[in-house]
Image: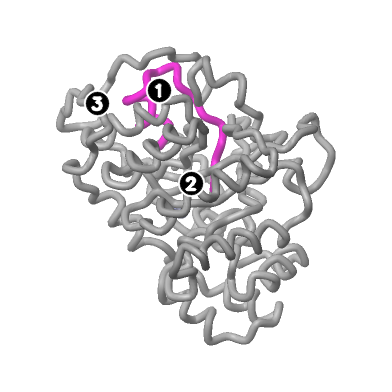
Amino acid sequence: MKKSNLFFAVAALSLGVAGLSGCFNRTEQQGAVSSSKTAKSLKHHSSSKKAAEESVRSSSSQSSSSSSPSISASSSSSSSSSAIVQTVAATQSGTNHIASANAYAYPASTVHVAMTGAKTSINHKVVFLTFDDGVNTSMSPRVLATLKQYGVHATFFIVGNTINSTTAPVLKQEYESGHGIAIHSFTHPYNFNAPGNSGGAIREYYQTLSAMRNVLGPKFDSKVWRYPGGHMSWRGLAASDANLSAEGITWMDWNAAVGDALGASGPKTAAAMLQYHAKTLVSFPQSNVEVVLIHDSVGKELSLQILPQIIDYYKQHGYQFGILS
Ligand SMILES: [Zn+2]
């Protein structure tokens, strides 16, 4: 089911165990620890990561509304998402960001190529902080506050079924604050490569886009997609990829990560997480763009804790902060 290309094997090896996985649950990570650290076993191990992150996903959709002090109460708090429709400031038709973000928005298709190390029109250092599995009212607002404090922007890969009347104000704030809004499926399944399911990704893409438009207005659009678990982890996505491509949608993986979805085998301290991040920087093809995988799902306290240091690292190394468009 999974890719077994050299790139994945080399990158995973240099990280020790299953280091590239964005969305794997605790059980799978424990399995990773017990397996030997050969490329062969890593590939085998990765092929067993099926029902990953469902626990994360379900918890993130059960977020409380009691801890969102930074969110303005602009939502109508209607009972259904279809009734959420709000006025969004600075709406820009046909994009995933407000007009003022044009200055630091980069086409995902270009970034996608740049991540392979190939030369592109991006001839300077740019980092794309990406936050997966929101939106929620407990962690997402705190990530937003930190980004604001440090004056940088990011791209949020939203899971569609987290969008409801309670979380709508947070999604709206992400958009209005100048961040990029991208799509990370509707239900976060791991079967987009299953036989007969080549249309699954595009279906969930449109489900999520519809939910987003209920909040951000009918002119909102996003052509940036991330597969649950990442494209790099799966084989058999060609048909699904073709369906996405036919609609002008770019799938986006990452080439840096903090290891915050690795469960038992993941970093447990701030220092370990920063070390993990540093390792990923040398595990992928060298590029002047870095796309950093982080999660803003409920409970990712350590990720939030080290976020200032991650930001500082890229600032000190001369990176601009971009968003994916
Ligand atoms: Zn995810």
Name the mark on residue 176.
1
Q: Secondary structure at mark 3?
A: loop
- Labels 1 & 3 near each other (Cβ < 8 A): no
Say if disc 2 is inside 8 Å of ligand 1.
Answer: no
Mark 3 is on which residue type? Ser
Q: Are marks 2 and 1 in contact (CB under 8 Å)?
A: no
User: Hey, which quadrant is residue 11 in on the image?
Assistant: bottom right
Element at label 2: helix
Q: Residue visible at 71% across and 62% down? A: 283
Which residue matches tag 2?
A: 308
240 horizontally vs 157: left or right? right
| 49 with respect to 127 (left or right) | left
Residue 221 within the magenta-colored segment of the rendering = yes
**Residue furthest toward the front?**
316
Kindly identify the amino acid type of the residue bearing the numbered disc 2.
Answer: Pro
Q: Is residue 218 visible?
A: yes
The CA distance from mark 2 to mark 3 is 24 Å
Residue at image coords 65%, 43%? 316
Check disc 3 and report the residue beneath it. Answer: 72
Q: CA distance from mark 2 to mark 1?
A: 22 Å
Which mark is nearer the camera, 2 or 1?
A: 2
The reply, left or right, for residue 221 in relation to residue 240 is: left
Provide residue 29's location: percent of width, then percent of height: 48, 75
Q: Residue furthest right?
A: 119
Vertical position of residue 231 compared to residue 110: above or below: below
